[in-house]
Amino acid sequence: MWPFGKSTQARLQEAIKSNQVLGKYNVEARVERKLAIFSGEVPGESLKNLMEVVAEGINGIEGSDTSAVTVLTPGEQNEPQIKQEQDPYALAKAVLKSLKSEPSLANNPIDIVQQGDKIILRGAVDSPAEAEKAKSLAAAIPGVSGVDASGLQVIAGASKLNVTDDDGDVVYTVKSGDTLSAIALHYYGSAARGAYMKIANANGLDDPNKIYVGQKLKIPGTVAGPDEELA
């Protein structure tokens, strides 16, 4: 169940590859301590700014480091340096600001991806009303030609579940009556052994039946997403 089944790093890398500009270049990205760390070679300084904007729209990331990105000199560039009279990433910035300014959406795990003049929203909200609110706020930004909110899932208490560790993965605090299979069902949409054992293995649990109230469990994300090895 996205976004909980996919790691923050995987979602960042996916956003980079799908970006109409950055996707053309060999840009590497990883996440450490909620920091997006980029490396690679690009033909213009503005692309480093774009990396920061893309990272800012990914839930679980709180900053960017582009110091390892090399900007090619004119003689080394494969194409002319990109010049823009206007900020080409203003739509994503404006949508992010609008959603964060809305109290009912501010703490929800939502990723914002800009493709041209279209906005893609992915993540989780607490109710259908919040999903509509997110879509309408994004659509109201001047210049946005369309909003794809099909990746927004309604999960009760989504905002309360949005607690992440240094890797950007979700951390859940065990409550009375919880079982590992029930927790897996809530996050991954599956209570199968593969789902709850993924949580058990990530937390070093020898016996998946032994969890206690107040215990903090890392809910690991994967590259492939929630369907990976859940059988």
Image (cartoon, rainbow, N blue to C red):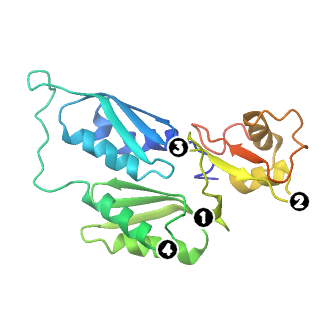
What is the C-alpha distance between the residues marked 2 and 4? 30 Å
Instruction: Name the element at disc 3.
Output: helix
Mark 4 nearby-residue class (10 Å; few <14, some 14–19, many ≥20): few
Residue picked out by circle 3: 8
Q: Considering only vertical position in the picture, is 72 above or below 65? A: above
In the rendered image, the vertical position of residue 204 relative to residue 92, given as above or below: above
**4 or 3: mark nearer the eye:** 4
Which one is closest to the eye, mark 2 or mark 3?
2
Which residue is located at x 53 percent, y 64 percent?
107
Q: Which mark is residue 31?
A: none
Does dot 4 land on a helix, a strand or a loop? loop
Q: CA distance from mark 2 to mark 3?
A: 29 Å
* Residue highlighted by disc 4: 103
Type of amino acid under label 3: Thr
N-terminal label among 1 and 4: 4
Amino acid at pointer 4: Pro
